[in-house]
Amino acid sequence: MISMRNVSKTYIAGKPALAEVNVDIEQGEFVFLVGHSGSGKSTFIKLLLREILPTTGSIVVAGQDLVRMKSWKVPFLRRNIGCVFQDFKLLPNKTTYENVAFALEAIGRSKHVVRTQVPEVLRLVGLEDKIDSYPDELSGGEQQRVSIARAFVNRPPLLLADEPTGNLDPTTSLGIMSLLSRINKTGTTVLVATHDREMVDSMRKRVIALENGRIIRDQDRGVYGDGD
Amino acid sequence: MAINLGYFVRESVVSFRRNWVMSLGAIITIYLSLLLVGVSVTGSMIVGQVVRDVEEKVSIRIFLKDGAAPEDVDKLQADLAADPRVKSIKYTSKEQALEEFKASMTESPEIVEQLEVNPLPASLDVDTVKPQDVMAVVETIKANPTFVKVCDRPDDPERSLKYGQQIVNQLFAFTRVLRVVGVVFIVMLAVISLIFINNTIRLAIYARRKEIGIMRLVGASNWFIRTPFLLEGLIQSLVGALLALLTLGVFESFALPKVEQTVAFLNLSLSPGSMAQVAVILIVGALVIGLSGSGFALRRYLKV
C-alpha cells in the first residue's frame, strides 16, 4: 500500500525534515507513527498526500508513483486516501450529514450515492441520531467521528490520521481508536501519527518511531519506547 | 464524471450574496466599459454612414469668370459630358447664383439689396457617377485648356474649383481622432474591469478557503474547484454586457430619432443588422473580460 525508498526531504537550507526513510506498509495493516513534534511526522503525512515532493527518493502509494505523478492526477490519488486531523476541519455552517455529503459531492458522486452512503457511514461511526446537528452542537469526540465518517465515506483503501486524539480526553480517545481499529478490520490500511503514549501502548500495533527525521525503530506489536 | 450544474449555480449565487458590493462594482465597471465600446461602435457606424452620405453629395463646382465666351463654356461642358465618369452637369448663371444667395439669406435680405453689382460668378456643377472619382475628374478639369480660359481666376485656376473632398477628408481626420480616444478609454476601462473581477474572485476564494481546503483533501478535481469562480466572473461580465445592450437599445430607439429630427439633413438611423452586430461584439467582449479576469485571479490565489 505504501512504499518509501531512501526518501529525504529538506526544506530550504535547513537540516533534513526526513532523511533516508525506508518504509513498507502492506494493505490492511494498522500502523502508528510516533515521535516528538518536529520529528518529521507531519512531513511524512504530507508526502503521502503529495502536498509536497521528496527531495530525493521514491514514494509509491496505492500503486501510484507520487514523484512521477502529473499534478492534475493528484486529486484522483487523494480519493484513495481518507484524512483525519487533530482540528477536525469540519465546515461550521453545514450539518453532520452535509459535512459528510460534501466529500462525495466534491468528487462528483451522484445524489443517489450520497443518499445511500452517508447514512451508512454515519451508522458505522455511531452518529445516526446526530445527522442534523451542527459541529458546534457536538462534543469533540463526536466532531472527530464526523471527520472520520467524511474520510471513510468514499471507502478509500488508505486512511491517514494526524494526531486524531490530540484534542480529546483519554476515554473519548479510546472510542476514536476503537473506531479506527474497526475501520481497519474492513480491510482499510490505517496509519495514525500520534504522540499519545498510553494509546500506542494499549493497542499493541506496529510502531514506526521517528526522531530528527530518521526512523529509529520499526517494530510489530510495539510500544511507545522509553527513549522516544 | 457526473457534473452537477445545480451545485455550480448555487455556489455562484451564494458567493454573490456574500460579497455583493464587490460584485456590483465589477458589474458596473464592466457595464461602463462595454457601454463605451457599444457607443463608439455604433457611433462609428453612424459616422461612417454620414461620411458615405456626404460623399454621395460631393460634387465639383467650377467658377467661371465674368464675360467668359459662351462657346468656350459650351466646349468645356461638352468635354465634361464626354467623360464617362461624369453623371451630370448643371449651369448656374450669375443671376441665378444671386437668386440662390438671396434665398439663403432670408434673415437679412437687406444685405443683398444693398449690393450695387452682382459679385457672384456663374458656375458649373459637375456630378460624378462614383464619389471616389471626384479627385480624378478634378485633375482632368485642371488639365483642360478651355477650363483655364474660362475660369474665374486665370492666374490661379486651382482656386476656381471647389469640391467636397476637403470636407470628407476633414471628417475622416476627425473620426480618426475620435476613434483613437475611444480605444484608449475602452482599454483603460477594460483593465479596470479586469482588476475588479480579479478582486471579487479573490474575496470569493478567501471567503471559501475552508471549503476549498476540504475539497482538495477529499480529492475534488481542479476544475470542480475552479468552475464556481469562473462562473461567477462570467455571470458578472454577462450581466454588465446585457445592461450595456439595454442602455444602447433605449438610446437607439428613443434618443436617436430625436437627434435626427434636429439635424434633418443627416441620416443617423442604423441599418437593422448593426444592433445585432454590436450585441455580438459586446457579448464576446464580456466573455473575454469575464474569463480572463477570473482566470488571472484563480492562477494567483488558488493554487490547486
Image (spheres, rainbow, N blue to C red):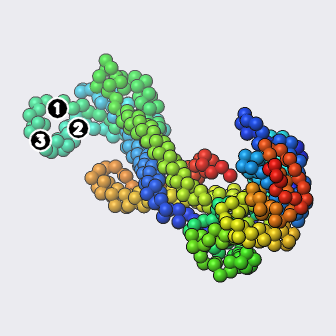
Report in which chain the residue with disc 1 lies: B
Q: Quadrant of the N terminus of chain B?
A: bottom right
Q: Is residue A24 above or below residue B104?
A: below
Residue A153, by quadrant, is bottom right
Distance between mark 2 and mark 1 Cα atoms:
9 Å
The residue at the point 20 percent across, 39 percent down is B101
Q: Nearer the viewer, residue B135 or A74?
A: A74
Disc 1 packing (10 Å; few <14; some 14–19; many ≥20):
few
Kind of residue at disc 1: Asn
Q: Nearer the viewer, mark 3 or mark 1?
A: 3
Q: Is residue A22 above or below residue A200?
A: above
Kind of residue at disc 3: Ser
Label 2 close to label 1 by CB (< 8 Å)? yes
Distance between mark 2 and mark 3 Cα atoms:
17 Å
Say which label, 2 or 3, has the lower sequence index. 2
Q: Would residue B16 appear left or right of B161 to someone viewing this image?
A: right
Kind of residue at disc 2: Ala
Report in which chain the residue with disc 2 lies: B
Q: Nearer the viewer, residue B242 or A144?
A: A144
Q: Would residue B250 appear left or right of A171 to someone viewing this image?
A: left
Name the residue that disc number 3 marks. B108
Say what secondary structure mark 1 lies in. Answer: loop
Distance between mark 3 and mark 1 Cα atoms:
17 Å
Say what secondary structure mark 2 lies in. Answer: helix
The residue at the point 77 percent across, 58 percent down is A197
x and y, in percent, of residue B252 in the image: 38, 58
Q: Would residue A134 appear left or right of A86 to someone viewing this image?
A: left
Name the residue that disc number 1 marks. B118
Report in which chain the residue with disc 3 lies: B
Which residue of the protein is positioned furthest toward the top in this rendering? B155
Name the residue that disc number 2 marks. B97
Say what secondary structure mark 3 lies in. Answer: loop
